[in-house]
Structures are given as C-alpha cells and as structure tokens.
Amino acid sequence: MKQKLFKMREAWAPLLAALLATAGSMCLSAQAHAADSDVQQSPICTDRPTKANATCTLPKDQWQIETDIGNVIVDRQDDTRTETLYFTNPTLKYGIGDRTNLQLNWAPGIRVRTTDRTTGEQQSLSGAGDIYLRLKTRFIENDRVSVAVIPFVKAPTARAGIGNRMWEGGVVLPVAVTLPASFTLTFGPEVDALGDADGSGRHAAIVNLVNLSHPLGSRASLVVEYWTMSNRDPAGTVKQSSADIAVSWLVTPKLQLDAGTNIGLNNATPDSQVYIGLSRRF
C-alpha cells in the first residue's frame, strides 16, 4: 500500500497525507472512546471483603478507594476482653499500568479498649494506624487461572499499643481459579517479615487461605473463607485460624457495598470481627 502511495503524483501527496491523518485521528479517537466506555461500564473489582486479595488490577490512570466504615474486633482471654474499633480504614488505589496498581492504606482512627474481666477496670488507647504501601501486578491471565503478586511494606506510624513501632513487609501471591457453575476459588499464600516480640529482630510468618465465592443474582455475591497464620516468633510460634463469611452488593458499576464477619477458631485468634464497608472507583 505504501509503495503505491509513493508512486502517486507529488501534487496529491499533501492532500492524501491530510486525509490519512484525519482518518487515523478519527480511528484512534473512536478506539479511545470505546476503551474508556468499557472501563467505565466494567464492574468494579476490589480486594474487599474478606482477607483474600483479588488478582484483578485497576485500569491505568483510574483511582479507587476501598474502606471499612465500621470494623470491630473482639478478643476474649482468661483475664481480659480487648475491643479494637476501626472508625474507617481506607485503601487508595491508582492504576499505573494495564496490569499494575499502587495501593496506600492508612487507618486514621483506631481505638483499643481493654477490660479486666475480674475487676471491670478499663483502659483505652486511641490513635492512627500504620501505613501500608503495596504494589499489585497481575502476570498470568487466561480463561481459567489468574495470578498476581503483591509485595508490600509497613511504615510504623502507629503509636505503641496500636502498632509495634517496627518496619515490616512481605509478599502475597493470590491465585484465582474459575470453576464450573460460576464459582471462583482463590488461594492466598503469603510470607511476611514481622518484628520480634522483644524488638530485637525479625522473623517469618506464613499465611494461607482458601476463598470460595459465588454470585447471588446479577449484583450480589457470597464469599466463604478459611484463613490460617503461623507467626514464628523466637519467643514462641503463634498459630491462628478463622472462618470468614461475607456478602457484597454492586450498587452501580463503580460502587460496591459489603459486610462480613470473621470467627476465630482457636484461642490465639480474636473471637470475632464484624465489619461493613464500601468501594468506589473514580
């Protein structure tokens, strides 16, 4: 085609170039409009609810916020009852590529209240939480399996008693498998480097989960999950596990509401966690 064009008379060249530029511009504009329309109409995809991370990423140059709007954790031990309340817990996301997004999480208001179960005496501590910076990249995507990797780091911005005042980090490898009858199975292996209880160094913690989700009609979904963590502190390994259940409702393609509860399955795990939240893409 180019060879034929170059053979045309010189007088036609400027007009032909203008026509080609105009047609190309119109084509690119139509493609961009269609792509933008697809992004705007595609349902929001979130890392909420439950502890599992989705393998999906935010479209390039898009913003999204995901947050608790109420989250209460209750932990009963022999002598104490500890209640941790998150007033909000926002995660801000930004798409930096077709398969990569940045995530920044910071809870501005946390209250920890401890009650002596014998005397009834209470102690309360309030403040902001630690800052978490995460980078999610989806590197496998087909009709059956999707895999992402999420390295993260925690900056110790919370006061002592709410946080441990130590830098920590880790990496998560969520794997989503599409099953028959619209079920989705998600695995969430994770390795963390956590601060030692005595503040002298760091140790490994191993997290695993199995998450099963299924749509309830065209807008709602039900999720059930089994989660475990083995915290290998030199002072003694602590093993936790929980059974989690949650529902989500797609109000619009850009807005999702959710609610859920996590039930501790052993004495080392908080007895219960109840939360509601929302996610909004901009």
Image (cartoon, grey):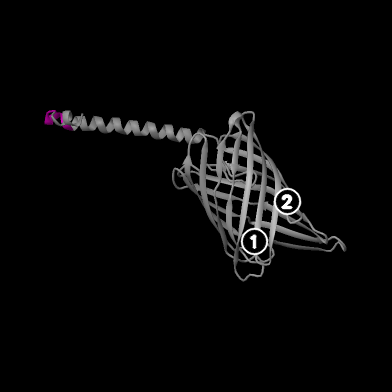
Quarter occupied by the N terminus:
top left
Residue 221 vertical position relative to residue 147 in the rendered view, above or below: above
Residue at 60% in and 69% down: 201
Looking at the image, which is closer to me, 233 or 134? 233
Q: Is residue 11 magenta?
A: yes
Q: Is residue 249 visible?
A: no
| Residue 25 at x, y percent in the picture | 31, 34
Question: Which element carries disc 1, helix, strand or loop?
Answer: strand
- In the visual, does 281 lie left or right of 249? left
Q: Circle 1 is placed at which residue position? A: 232
Looking at the image, which is closer to me, 246 or 145? 145
| Residue 5 at x, y percent in the picture | 17, 29
Q: CA distance from mark 2 to mark 1?
A: 26 Å
Q: Earlier in the sequence, mark 2 or mark 1?
A: 2
Q: Is residue 235 visible?
A: yes
Badge 1, how many Cα within 10 Å: few under 14, some, many 20+? some
SS majority, magenta: helix
Question: Which element carries disc 2, helix, strand or loop?
Answer: strand
| Residue 58 at x, y percent in the picture | 50, 43
Q: Which residues are magenta?
A: 8-13
Q: Nearer the viewer, mark 2 or mark 1?
A: 1
Q: Circle 2 is placed at which residue position? A: 72
Tag 2 and tag 1, C-beta contact below 8 Å: no
